[in-house]
């Protein structure tokens, strides 16, 4: 039987109960957003005792379905002030699912200034005092070492890094991956919520776990095979992501003139070669040693878009070295050395801070005169200051909006106070609509997947024109909300969008596991309902259409080389959520 | 006032074409002479790139189908299949791609080990792993490796005699020998 675990940090007590009826058919984002909308007071302070933090694996997590190991985390965001779901790779979701844990909720807040570790295993949940050697500055790498030592090498770990302990608004929640490196539930400051509840770490030991029950194992196996093949057959998921990582996009988006540079003042850079995925691949291949061109962030990933990036001597620097981070530091902040960017990536993993928010905040800080443009060493030092935290560390760790305000800038690239990611909305208009309207704040992963035939909505899109963009953004957001509920990595999108068999296989797996007969329409409806629930929460939290807007400067500052402007009217933007 | 016509184009290759460009031309971007307009397909062939390996081209920052006409002074990039994310739609890949021969299709691929012997090694790897479309034969391999058919005198697949036209299966080992004599 599935369990629903609630940890009350006010009384330091644990309740393990049955899953409430209404959550039985939900997982991942559908579950976290449904729960937050039900139980979190929309007007609460995100760092106060009435916010609740919920961890939920996806519907397919813990099964043999390829790429199904994502963990969703939800709460009211201290960064945006709205509802937030953030998901991550690593081993946590699979362990929770195998132990039959539908969700873990952390609520309340201890009175004393002491940090705790929640330990989940076959016997239940204990609340231990956190080892002092991982509190007050030591980074996530050290914390993983200490917790592995204390609880065993094979445990799953979720961490609030120093940034989370200090409740910095851009703090992430870090998850241990199968090799002991770090993946992140990056956006929206959920690490600060965890820190506000004085939970330093959650350790999960699935020894002896029963595994995930499957209603029709033969049907499941057959569908899982079709699904995995769809992923492997597609050149994106089957080859390009493995070879070049997500960083394959630097050259592509730069060529398209949409790579935001120097705090969103232009869309193309000259030094794209220094920071491209092709160069990253070449560096890793040449340097050998501990470098790996391709690896997966959780067991069962067949796409393997991650990598181990080594220094010139072949020693491991960082893993999960993503396009967003490299774009942000390399193009938006103008740092030209990929190795320094790798060290900064590692430092952000260590301090537990969102790399997208920080990269954009850093570029904004550069425009504001707080840091020299393109100075990698200065940025590396500034990130490390977040572990102290110094005033500069606190400022940068509070996100782009706060930095922009402190520096008195109008060119502050945020929506709902969350930093805009690596695609300029002026020459790539569809993305701009997603940034503006998603309940998550500016988020490129919120509109990532279409669940049906892309040609219907995407057949004739011209990125510089308005035609078709509203339908595109709407369909992508709906599809993504559904995928986010399955525990699937968004990159399965390719196996679904271009290959109808792949799409059907995903639905078949869910049906086979739970003994259901969902159709494609049901999946769409799930996506729609998640978005509606999230939007309703935000309205109660004080949001309205005026918040679904891009910063004003996009309307009058042209983005070279296409020199395009953001020209959607408010009425047009509001059309996206007209369903 | 007269304006000097720029009789060159700036060309880049992405993904695996990046490495090929660097090896072949020594530099990225390649500054390529161009007097008259040329289609993407013809430019690819001129540069020794198989058009079947290209999903779309960029011309002056816009995604275009391969038969688009490139003019002197343009900035061009070749993009193999592999662009991830919603950008495939957002940047217009699908819109540009539908009738194009190089349109991305789900292509069934096989992996074969290719062993070259004696004089065929020359400046080539003696053993490589090659990924080929299903239905490929040794004649496709020698074409890719620029080995003239007369030099590929003996073909073996998994140790058994075969011909240039034998159909290859996934995980086959293909051995290719030049005309050899002796005794």
Image: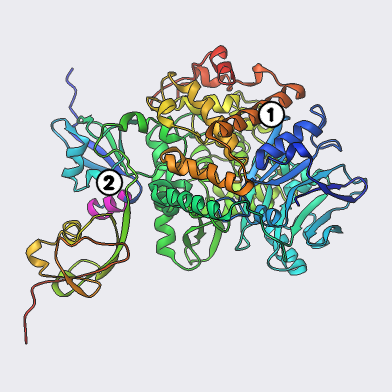
Q: Residues within 10 Å of mark 1 (few under 14, many from 20)?
A: many
Q: Is residue A529 above or below residue A56?
A: above
Q: Residue at x 36, y 33 (%)?
A: B93
In which quadrant of the rendered view does residue B83 lie?
top left
Foreground residue, A432 or B74? A432
In which quadrant of the rendered view does residue A486 lie?
top right
Q: Is residue A524 above or below residue A299?
A: above
- Left or right of residue A444, residue A188 in this image: right
Residue A86 location in percent, x, y?
65, 41
Q: Residue at x 60, y 35 (%)?
A: A481
Residue A264 location in percent, x, y?
51, 30
- Asked whether residue A490 appears in the rendered view, the answer is yes
Q: Which residue is mark 1?
A: A534
Instruction: Let me know if marks 2 and 1 both belong to one chain.
Output: no
Q: Which mark is residue A377?
A: none
Q: Nearer the viewer, mark 2 or mark 1?
A: 1
Magenta part, dominant SS: helix
Secondary structure, mark 1, is: helix
Q: Which mark is residue B53?
A: 2
Check residue A39 for magenta coloring.
Answer: no
Q: Residues within 10 Å of mark 2 (few under 14, many from 20)?
A: some
- Left or right of residue A340, residue B56 in this image: left
Residue A37 location in percent, x, y?
75, 31
Secondary structure, mark 2, is: helix
Foreground residue, A43 or B76? A43
To which chain does the residue with label 1 belong? A
Give the magenta range: B17-25
To which chain does the residue with label 2 belong? B
Q: Residue at x 32, y 42 (%)?
A: B105
Residue B81 location in percent, x, y?
35, 44
Tell me, what colour scheme is on the image? rainbow
- Asked whether residue A329 appears in the rendered view, the answer is no
């Amino acid at each position: 039987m599935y369990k629903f675990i609630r940890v009350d940090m006010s009384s330091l007590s644990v309740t393990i109960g049955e899953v409430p009826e209404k959550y039985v058919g939900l997982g991942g984002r559908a579950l976290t957003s449904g729960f937050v909308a039900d139980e979190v007071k929309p007007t609460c302070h995100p760092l106060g005792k009435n916010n609740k933090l919920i961890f939920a694996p996806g519907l397919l997590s813990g099964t043999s379905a390829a790429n199904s190991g994502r963990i969703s985390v939800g709460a009211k965001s201290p960064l945006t002030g709205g509802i937030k779901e953030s998901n991550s790779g690593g081993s946590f979701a699979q362990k929770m699912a195998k132990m039959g844990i539908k969700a873990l909720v952390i609520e309340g807040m201890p009175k004393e200034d002491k940090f705790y570790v929640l330990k989940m295993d076959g016997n239940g949940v204990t609340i231990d005092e956190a080892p002092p050697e991982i509190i007050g500055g030591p980074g996530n790498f050290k914390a993983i070492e200490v917790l592995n030592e204390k609880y065993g090498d094979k445990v799953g770990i979720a961490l609030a890094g120093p940034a989370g302990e200090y409740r910095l608004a851009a703090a992430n929640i870090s998850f241990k991956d199968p090799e002991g490196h770090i993946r992140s539930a990056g956006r929206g400051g959920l690490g600060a919520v965890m820190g506000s509840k004085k939970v330093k770490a959650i350790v999960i030991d699935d020894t002896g776990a029963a595994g995930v029950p499957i209603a029709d194992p033969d049907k499941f196996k057959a569908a899982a095979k079709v699904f995995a093949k769809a992923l492997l057959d597609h050149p994106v998921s089957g080859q390009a992501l493995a070879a070049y990582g997500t960083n394959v996009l630097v050259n592509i988006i730069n060529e398209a003139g949409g790579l935001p540079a120097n705090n969103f003042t232009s869309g193309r850079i000259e030094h794209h070669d220094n920071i491209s995925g092709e160069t990253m691949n070449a560096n890793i291949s040449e340097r050998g040693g501990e470098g790996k061109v391709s690896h997966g962030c959780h067991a069962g990933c067949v796409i393997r878009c991650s990598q181990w990036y080594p220094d010139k001597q072949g020693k491991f620097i960082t893993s999960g070295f993503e396009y967003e981070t490299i774009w942000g530091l390399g193009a938006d902040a103008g740092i030209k050395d990929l190795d320094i960017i790798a060290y900064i990536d590692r430092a952000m993993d260590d301090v537990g801070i969102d790399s997208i928010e920080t990269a954009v905040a850093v570029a904004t800080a550069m425009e504001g005169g707080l840091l020299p443009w393109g100075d990698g060493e200065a940025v590396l030092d500034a990130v490390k200051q977040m572990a102290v935290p110094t005033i500069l560390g606190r400022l940068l760790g509070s996100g782009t909006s706060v930095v922009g305000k402190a520096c008195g800038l109008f060119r502050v690239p945020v929506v709902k106070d969350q930093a805009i990611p690596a695609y300029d909305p002026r020459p790539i208009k569809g993305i701009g609509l997603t940034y503006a309207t998603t309940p998550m704040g500016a988020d490129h992963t919120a509109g990532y997947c279409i669940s049906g035939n892309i040609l219907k909505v995407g057949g004739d899109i011209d990125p510089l024109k308005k035609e078709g963009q509203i339908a595109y953004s709407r369909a992508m957001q709906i599809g993504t909300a559904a995928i986010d509920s399955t525990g699937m990595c968004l990159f399965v999108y390719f196996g679904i969008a271009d290959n109808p068999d792949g799409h059907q296989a995903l639905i078949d797996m869910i049906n086979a596991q739970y003994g259901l007969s969902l159709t494609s329409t049901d999946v769409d409806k799930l996506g729609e309902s998640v978005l509606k629930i999230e939007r309703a929460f935000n309205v109660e939290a004080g949001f309205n259409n005026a918040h679904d807007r891009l910063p004003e400067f996009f309307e009058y500052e042209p983005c070279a080389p296409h020199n395009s402007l953001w020209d959607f009217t408010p009425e047009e933007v509001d059309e996206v959520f007209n369903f | 006032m007269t304006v000097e016509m720029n009789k060159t184009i700036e060309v880049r290759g992405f993904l695996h074409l990046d490495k090929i460009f660097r090896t072949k031309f020594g530099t990225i971007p390649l500054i390529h002479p161009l007097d008259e307009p040329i289609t993407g397909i013809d430019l690819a062939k001129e540069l020794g790139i198989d058009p079947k390996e290209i999903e779309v081209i960029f011309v002056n920052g816009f995604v275009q189908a391969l038969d688009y006409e490139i003019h002197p002074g343009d900035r061009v990039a070749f993009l193999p299949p592999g662009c991830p994310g919603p950008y495939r739609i957002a940047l217009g890949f699908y819109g540009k791609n539908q009738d194009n021969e190089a349109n991305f299709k789900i292509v069934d691929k096989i992996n074969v080990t290719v062993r070259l012997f004696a004089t065929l090694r020359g400046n080539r790897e003696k053993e490589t792993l090659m990924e080929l479309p299903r239905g490929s034969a040794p004649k496709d391999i020698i074409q890719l490796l620029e080995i003239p058919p007369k030099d590929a005198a003996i073909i073996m697949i998994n140790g058994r005699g075969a011909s240039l036209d034998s159909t290859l299966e996934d995980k086959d080992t293909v051995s290719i020998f030049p005309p050899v004599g002796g005794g």
